[in-house]
Amino acid sequence: MNEALLIWGIVLLVVAAFLLVLEVFIPSAGVIAVTSAVVAVAGIVCLFRYDATWGLIGSLAVLVVGPILGGFMLKIWPNTPIGRRLIGSPSEEDIAQAHETQKLEQAERLAMIGMEGQAVTDLRPVGMAKIGERRLDVLAESGWIKAGSAVRVTHADGSQIKVRQV
């Protein structure tokens, strides 16, 4: 009969650890985590009823392994499908699409080099210019350019477009 308490205690502690891991993958608003804690306490009680040494070992295991396991689960949680959905992390398709969009925008900006347009606002040195059909924030390479002056795109890197007065 006593060995049954030892086996039950160990099995309940293993089930508690499994439930803690399961909480990461199944959103239950903490119900599974609370159940895990209750099962761990039941396992410790079984171990104490078998022998005080086993009860202390089980208590120490829960107090040391429990937080380590919980911290590890919190670390991997953002990488689970449910964690990504709850946090709002973009999917791989969204990341790939954003990367493609960024490449296209960069290609469009590089194609603007050499194009001419007109300063819509005074460029001191930053302002608006109309290049083709688009109004863009631009940076004057040298000093100040009055509104209405003709400008030419000389550099387009990232989100910055540099112009020079023609």
Image: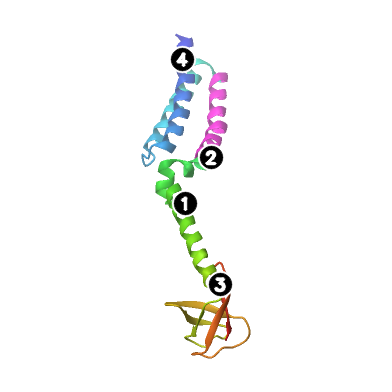
First in sequence: mark 1 vs mark 3: 1
Instruction: Please report the residue visible at 40 percent of the width from the left and 42 percent of the height from the top.
Output: 82
In the image, which disc is placed on residue 96? 1
Q: Are marks 1 and 2 in contact (CB under 8 Å)?
A: no
> Secondary structure of the magenta portion, mostly?
helix
Q: Secondary structure at mark 1?
A: helix
Q: Element type at marker 3? A: strand
In the rendered structure, which disc, 3 or 4, sits on the residue that comes first in sequence? 4
Q: Kindly indicate whether the residue at mark 3 contacts the one at mark 2 (C-beta within 8 angstroms).
A: no
| Residue in the picture at 53% in, 22% down | 55
Numbered circles on residues, count: 4
- Check disc 1: other Cα within 10 Å, few if <14, some if 14-19, many if 20+: few
> Quadrant of the image for the N terminus?
top left
Task: Classify residue 113 by image quadrant.
Answer: bottom right
Q: Of discs 1 and 4, which sits in the foreground?
A: 1
Disc 1 to disc 3, C-alpha distance: 23 Å
